[in-house]
Image: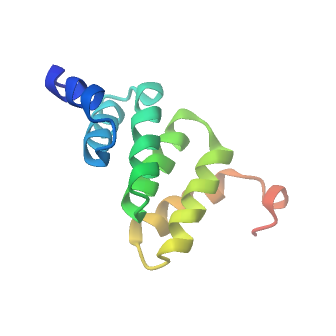
Amino acid sequence: CSHSQKELLSLKPDIPQAWCVLGKYYQGQRLFEKALYPLKQCSLLDPKVENLVSYGTVLFDYGNIDTALNVLERAYNTDNTNEKAIYYYGLVLAWVPDDEYGYL
């Protein structure tokens, strides 16, 4: 991640795309803990389905299954035709016990 991008975020913290790029960079490097905050900011500033899915998947990768489930359920409920939302929501549902959430 470039120094200029971090500098931009410190000057203009309300740019969702910059947070998204930073978070996805960290996620791609498998630095899930570092990816959490940028992707959360991205999804809060611009809560479109793609950003919710990105945040939900990094939560899942980090091991925060409950929050990942909530975020991905929100993504799915926002657009239940989005293939990534369907896939990752189903993936996280497969990780929770059937009786824990009463979904299955």
The quadrant in which residue 92 appears is bottom right
Question: Looking at the picture, does residue 61 appear above or below residue 47?
Answer: above
Along the horizontal axis of the image, is 25 left or right of 59? left
Using residue 29 as the reference point, say whether residue 34 is left or right of it. right
Q: Is residue 31 above or below residue 101?
A: above
Q: Position of residue 34 (x, y in %)?
A: 42, 25
- Depth check, front residue: 19 or 95: 19
What residue is shown at x 33% (from left), y 30% (from top)?
Answer: 26
Picture coordinates of residue 52, whole percent (x, y): 46, 56
- Residue 90 can be seen in this image: no
Q: Observer-nearest residue: 15 or 21?
A: 15
Residue 12 in sight here? yes
At 37% from the left and 60% from the top, the residue drawn is 50
Furthest residue to the top? 3
Where residue 15 appears, x then y in whole percent?
A: 28, 44
Q: Is residue 46 above or below residue 27?
A: below
Q: Quadrant of residue 7?
A: top left
Q: Quadrant of the N terminus?
A: top left
